[in-house]
Amino acid sequence: TTEKYVMEELDAWKILGTDGHLNANRPWLSYHEFLTSYSAEIVGALDKEVVVMNSLTVNLHLLMVSFYRPKGKRKKILIEKHAFPSDRYAVQSQLKFHGNDPNDDLIVFEADKGEFIPMDTIMNYLEKHGEEIALVLLGGVNYYTGQAFDMAAITDKAQSSGCRVGFDLAHAAGNIILNLHDWGIDFAAWCGYKYLNGGPGAPSGVFIHEQHLGRTDYPRFEGWWGHDK
């Protein structure tokens, strides 16, 4: 039961102290690895494409370090209307970090009529303006309208226009069927406390497609245990 596992961890903390990082029944140092295969199955990914860590917005920032790489006129980021507010704040701050103006370089995609955004509208926009867009970052399921985007089609169209493609899956992971690997999405992140039923402080998940793994030419922010993964 949940209570049993919680008590085991508390006992390990009481008895082992800091040695629990290596010597607990479930060593804390590699704890995230216990969640990898389950998380990969939920989002339709290979185990090596998934890691569980941090919070959602922190992970989006880390991912944009690598995947938002403005150059020349290709510097805009596309999000949808009613994107979750923290996503919008994160994107705006990334644009500013790179010396770009959110008033000019943040594209907020709106529906022609009503709340849902027709796929034809998205496809036509990417066809006409894709060369200006560095990153497409949408919610897999929009939290406000409930619209589930055709992630495979959007990814294919955006990538054919030279854009990188990421998704916030906070309202999709555990809610709809996902096949991130097969869809060829560049990256995604999700939280653990909505449809995955985690409690307060439940960690976020990250997906990076295997085609990007091991690339040394991508900028990234490294740390103690993240420098070689």
Image (cartoon, rainbow, N blue to C red):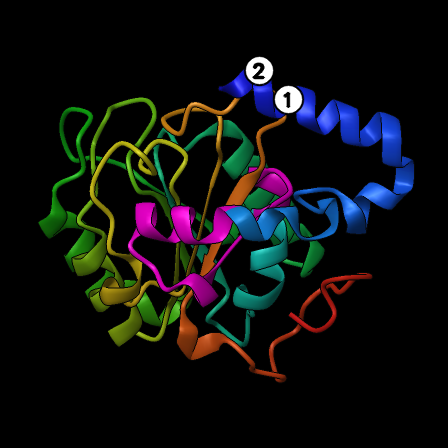
Circle 1 residues within 10 Å: few <14, some 14–19, many ≥20: few
* Position of residue 197 in the picture relative to residue 69 (left or right): left
* Nearest the eye: 105 or 17: 17
Q: Is residue 12 visible?
A: yes
* Position of residue 65 in the picture relative to residue 212 (left or right): right
Circle 2 residues within 10 Å: few <14, some 14–19, many ≥20: few
At which x and y percent is residue 94? 63, 52
Regarding mark 1 in the picture, which secondary structure is present there? helix
The residue under label 2 is: 3
Q: Quadrant of residue 130?
A: bottom left
The residue type indicated by label 2 comes to Glu
Q: Quadrant of residue 18?
A: top right
Judge whether 171 appears above or below 168 on screen.
above
Pointers 1 and 2 in contact (CB under 8 A)?
A: yes
As measured in the structure, the alpha-carbon distance from the residue carrying label 1 to the one carrying label 2 is 5 Å
- Main secondary structure type of the part rendered in magenta: helix
Residue at x-position 42% and y-position 23%: 197
Residue 119 in magenta stretch: no
The residue under label 1 is: 6
Residue at x-position 63% and y-position 26%: 201
Residue range highlighted in magenta? 35-59
Residue at x-position 12% and y-position 48%: 119
In the picture, the disc for residue 20 is none
* Nearest the eye: 23 or 116: 23
The residue type indicated by label 1 comes to Val
Residue at x-position 42% and y-position 53%: 37
